[in-house]
Image (cartoon, grey):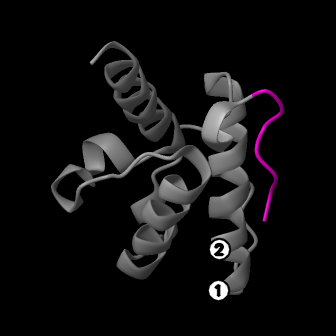
Amino acid sequence: MTAPAPGAAGGQPTTGHDMEATLTEFIEQQFHDQGDDVALEPDDDLVLLGFDSIAYVRLVAFIKEQFGIRVPDSEVTVEQFGTVRAMVGYLEQRLAGEETG
């Protein structure tokens, strides 16, 4: 498990790039645990690569633990969780909403 980013409240990385790197590392590890070595790019389609429902459950739990963001099941969609780049955009919006609301 990776340590929270320095200076980040609640373990939240301070930039989208940090978040992207953290998510990419976690997802690549999930593939590795299934016997697949994947060098993930930000726009790679996770479903086409074989990221299954169990992996998504683990990912949502990781996001809650690492970033302090609870993701409702209804928001785990292909549009928001189909690629690492889409996830980062979604999570940044959630963080911005929590800061302002």
Q: Amino acid at mark 2?
A: Phe
Q: State the SS at label 1.
A: loop
Residue 13 image offset from top left, x and y in percent:
68, 33
Q: Looking at the image, which residue is at 43% across and 45% down?
A: 69
Quadrant position of residue 65:
bottom right
Q: Main secondary structure of the magenta part?
A: loop
Q: Amino acid at mark 1?
A: Gln
Q: State the SS at label 2.
A: helix
Q: Is residue 49 visible?
A: yes
Q: Are marks 2 and 1 in contact (CB under 8 Å)?
A: yes
| 44 left or right, relative to 97 | right
Q: Nearer the viewer, residue 48 or 53?
A: 53
> Magenta span covers which residues?
1-7
| 9 left or right, relative to 59 | right
The quarter of the rendered structure image containing the C terminus is: top left
Q: Nearer the viewer, residue 22 or 24?
A: 22
Q: Residues within 10 Å of mark 1 (few under 14, many from 20)?
A: few
Residue 71 position (above or below residue 53): above
Q: Looking at the image, which residue is at 40% across and 73% down?
A: 57
Q: Which residue is mark 1?
A: 34
> Which label belongs to residue 99?
none
Task: Point out the residue furthest to the top here.
Answer: 100
Q: Looking at the image, which residue is at 79% across and 27% down?
A: 7
Residue 23 image offset from top left, x and y in percent:
62, 49
Q: Which residue is mark 2?
A: 31
Q: Nearer the viewer, residue 88 or 41?
A: 88
Q: Is residue 40 visible?
A: no
Residue 97 position (above or below residue 60): above
Q: Residues within 10 Å of mark 2 (few under 14, many from 20)?
A: some
